[in-house]
Image: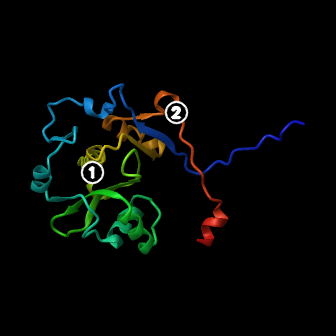
Amino acid sequence: MQQPQLQPRVRARAFLHAAVKLNPRGNPFLLRRPAASAGGAVAGVQLTVSDSELSSRGFAVRRTAEGLDVAALNEVFARVGFPRRQEERLRRALEHSEVAWLASEATGRPVAFARAAGDGVFNAVVWDVVVEPSCQGLGLGRAVMERLVAELRRKGVGNIVLYAEPRVVGFYRPLGFAMDPDGIRGMAYYRSKQNQKQQ
């Protein structure tokens, strides 16, 4: 008896899988950036702009969620087209995440943010990379991603993955991320819309 063919569900927003590709010695290609960068290296990851340079431009570098105004972060999410999150659930997610964010030194509010969750040893998934629209194009997204990846690499995490909308894939490539490395395909399990409404 022939099995019926199942039709895949298509989501309104397509996400593509990307991963930091490792060379045979276990070093991510991310480490192969030219050494001429002005920011210096952290955990083998070349920073394109130093913390002191960011500070001179009015941005404070933060590497923990301490002091992060969750309501203000939710506002940034909304301005870039991300869904708003329930603040208590977002706080819980932050408790289980590595974070890197930049605060405006004038207001203390977040202007760039990225987080990753994982097992802290082998694997991590990057989520919620956002930059306040009025601050886009200043290299702040790259700055938080470099710091997030550096912290994960410092802890020995070798497999770092993310999901990116097709329009932003080009942002991640110069950071060392590769589409479907070695033919690996990402898969995701999504609850039905009905189940999500009940949460």
The quadrant in which residue 19 appears is top left
| Amino acid at dot 1 | Val
Residue drawn 34% across and 31% down?
26
The label on residue 144 is 1
Q: Is residue 52 left or right of residue 137?
A: left
Counting labels gives 2
The label on residue 38 is none
Q: Is residue 77 above or below residue 147?
A: below
Q: Quadrant of the N terminus?
A: top right
Q: Position of residue 197 (x, y in %)?
A: 61, 69
| Amino acid at dot 2 | Ile
Mark 2 secondary-structure assignment: loop
Mark 1 secondary-structure assignment: helix
Q: Position of residue 189 (x, y in %)?
A: 60, 51
Using the numbered discs, state the Cα–Cα distance from disc 2 to disc 1 in whole angstroms: 26 Å
Q: Residues within 10 Å of mark 2 (few under 14, many from 20)?
A: few
Residue drawn 69% across and 44% down?
8
Q: Position of residue 84 (x, y in %)?
A: 45, 67
The quadrant in which residue 169 appears is top left
Residue with the mark numbered 2: 184
